[in-house]
Image (cartoon, rainbow, N blue to C red):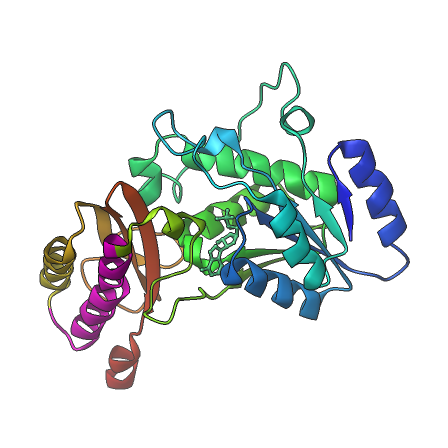
Amino acid sequence: MQTATTLDMLRNALAKLRHAGSTVALVPTMGALHEGHLALVREARAKCDHVVASIFVNPTQFGPNEDLDAYPRQLAQDSAMLEAEGVALLWAPTLEAMYPDGFATTISVSGVSEGQCGAARPGHFDGVATVVCKLFNQVMPDMAFFGEKDFQQLAVIRAMARDLDLTRPHVRDIVGVPTVREADGLAMSSRNRYLSQRDRAAAAALPRAMKAAIAAIEAGEDVGQALAALKDALLGAGFDRIDYAELVDSTSLAALDSVNCVPARLLVAARIGGTRLIDNMGVSIKGQYQQA
Ligand code: AMP
């Protein structure tokens, strides 16, 4: 596996990788890799000839009071994990390579980026859209892989790529990969390591309460009541605050107060012991289709 830290190194390495007819996948990450990231790499390897993984802790997507400085950095360990997975090229740009002096452009996607995490973390998705647009232009991958774990991020990136014509001729496909979970159901996240042993145990209440809410909604219970019960369950389990718990249209992310004939998703962000956890799950509307 080669590692590039400057744009020149990246371009040279990409030129050597690309040959007639070969396909290149991009897997963007912020490092501190776990099985969730590796699932993206494996999917990318299955679909493309070469995988480029990026590791960049992007400062522009962190708010002033967020965990940029504390965010785990372990490049040597991550690099070994990527190499073992058959990644061809690691793009680990320096801060200067990504944001040279005088950098002045921001991409802002309205609509899908405004609710949920966008409301709770002002500016976050501008930082994400801008850095991902740069990564797309730098690597020009045939396919790019993102986790459904960050469901709103995936929606923002799809909208940005569509609106800025990034989907043709490059980035032919933006692939969403299902969330990888721990044995007790907690979605894997680089931030789980911030949790104390007690909070880690309590955090399993998040997927459990979400499943219970989804079962209630799918059984025809009132959405508002199911969401209220979900919030109560989280607060009862030791969560300190719920940023949001919403049933949304899976494409527009507009809030729904009932499950109608659009694919729906339950999105939750909640805080425990100073750590903010997010999760999302699909809500089936099978019963309604069967009745129709
Ligand atoms: P991050 O390093 O947190 O920015 O994540 C990099 C990529 O990995 C994003 O596309 C995430 O959605 C994805 N990802 C993170 N955690 C998981 C997980 N548990 N399962 C699947 N994908 C994940």
Along the line of sight, which residue is nearer the eye, 260 or 97? Answer: 97
Q: In which quarter of the image is residue 24?
A: bottom right
- The image quadrant where one finds the C terminus is bottom left
Q: Residue at point 42% right, 54% down? A: 189
Task: Where is residue 67? Give x, y as percent.
Answer: 39, 34
Along the line of sight, which residue is nearer the eye, 290 or 146? Answer: 146
Task: Where is residue 217? Give x, y as percent.
Answer: 18, 70
**Part of the protein shown in magenta:** 198-221
Q: Is residue 241 above or below residue 229?
A: above
Q: Quadrant of residue 48?
A: bottom right
Along the line of sight, which residue is nearer the eye, 96 or 286? Answer: 96
Magenta span contains residue 201? yes
Magenta part, dominant SS: helix
Q: Answer left or right for 274 relative to 191.
A: left
Q: Residue at point 46% right, 51% down? A: 155
Q: Answer left or right for 118 relative to 37.
A: left
Q: In this view, does 98 lie above or below 178?
A: above
Task: Where is residue 184? Give x, y as percent.
Answer: 32, 70
Q: Is residue 167 visible?
A: no
Q: In this view, does 258 lie above or below 238?
A: below
Q: Is residue 267 visible?
A: yes
Q: How many discs appear? A: 0
